[in-house]
Image: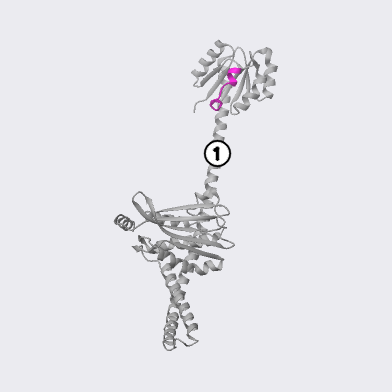
Amino acid sequence: MPFTVLVIDDDADTRENLWDILEMDGYTVETAGSAAEVLDRSDWDRIDAILLDRRLPDATAESLLPHLKRLAPQAEVLIVTGYADVQGAIAAFRLGAADYIIKPIEAAELRARLGRIAESTAGRRELQAAHAARERALVDLRAKSEELRATTQQLWLAARLAGVGELAASIAHELNNPLGIVHLRLESILSHTPKDDSRRSALEVIDHEVERMARLVANLLQFSRPGRDQVSTVDVTDEVMRTIELTEHYFRHRGVGVQSDFHPSVPDIFADRQQLRQVLLNLFTNAADAMVEGGTLKLGVHPVELSADKPGVVIAVADTGVGIAAEHLARVTDPFFSTKDEGKGTGLGLAICRRIVEQHHGRLEIASTLGIGTTVRVLLPVKNEENVVGLQNND
């Protein structure tokens, strides 16, 4: 790395002589003839050492040194003085000068004194580089440690959720048989109960609730079944309604009301039904969790133009929850990033949603205002031959 010396002397011959000596020794040399010229510089970070004449036409070393130490704190200053000004050079020491040399300057002495400054500077640079490298290593280590901690927690949560999913699937299987038996018995009783019988109304209510429980169990089994990715024609509105039914208790428990706005003529899409349900379930539960004191979940399904001559379907999920801070909005779909309290979110839900939507050649849009709520829009292309081929290639 080049070592740059700034020579400050009002005598042109002295500047030229010093230039020749220093350049011969491999130094990069720059010169100035006055304090005004020196203070007009802007590239101080390039200067490693300064040869400063004790007396200049417009300043002394003592008056200029504070400015030099401020402008180039990394540069060591070597005072050039005559015998009569040694006391002035000593005063300059007190202001931060590194050394001094007596005029007339002996080349050998200059090399020795400047060489010590260069060695000292090189040693300091090595220490600074080592310190910076150590600091970077510590930062990297802390980041890796935090990443490992976060990953361990997410894996623990994922394993826990997987266990809950297996338990739910097992319970759902166990509930299927008794629900089927109850339904058959009710049908038998209803078939023998006259329509004008006062007990029939209560039996019909029970039968309706048993059917609703059976649908919930069926939906739960479909959501928890792993299976392989399988693409097919999907009625988006029907899938949204099924997910609402599955999460109805979740909403009710949190004081969340649901408002739906479904267009009567929504075209089908070509999608992996299981993955689409995963997206909807994540978005619905995220929205409910954001409404800590209850609120309204607005769900919409409408046809939309994704771009010129490219029709699609938009699923809008809008909550009246706490919202997302502007500085976090760009990161909410990053893996392991969560705005929920520690232990309450895996930081994977929206990342998985985005990946699934993009695999279906769609896009995920999120708009939010802190304290007002969040709207997530899932835009997916309608069923066509290009989407069919693209999704099959993803499998």
Residue 297 location, x and y as percent?
51, 61
Q: Is residue 233 above or below residue 190?
A: above
Can see residue 156? Answer: no
Query: Is residue 91 shown left or right of residue 119?
Result: right
Q: Is residue 119 above or below residue 34?
A: below
The quarter holding residue 185 reads bottom left
Kind of residue sitting beneath label 1? Ala
- Taking depth in this image into account, of 16 and 108 the one nearest to the observer is 16
Quadrant of the snapshot with the C terminus: bottom left
The quarter holding residue 56 reads top right
Question: Looking at the image, which residue sits at the far front?
Answer: 196
Q: Main secondary structure of the magenta part?
A: helix
- Taking depth in this image into account, of 48 and 223 the one nearest to the observer is 223
Q: Give the residue number, with chain letter if any, for mark 1.
A: 132
- Taking depth in this image into account, of 272 and 378 the one nearest to the observer is 378
- Taking depth in this image into account, of 83 and 44 the one nearest to the observer is 44
Q: Is residue 124 above or below residue 309?
A: above
Can see residue 141? Answer: yes
Q: Residue at x 47, y 71 (%)?
A: 168
Q: Is residue 266 above or below residue 54?
A: below
Count residues near mark 1 (Cα–Cα under 10 Å), then give few for <14, some for 14-19, many for 20+.
Answer: few
Residue 392 location, x and y as percent?
31, 58
- Is-magenta flag for residue 37? yes
Query: Is residue 304 shown left or right of residue 88?
Result: left
Residue 374 location, x and y as percent?
52, 55
Residue 52 location, x and y as percent?
61, 18
Stretch in magenta: 36-46
Q: Secondary structure at mark 1?
A: helix
- How is colour applied across the structure in the image? one colour
- Is-magenta flag for residue 39? yes
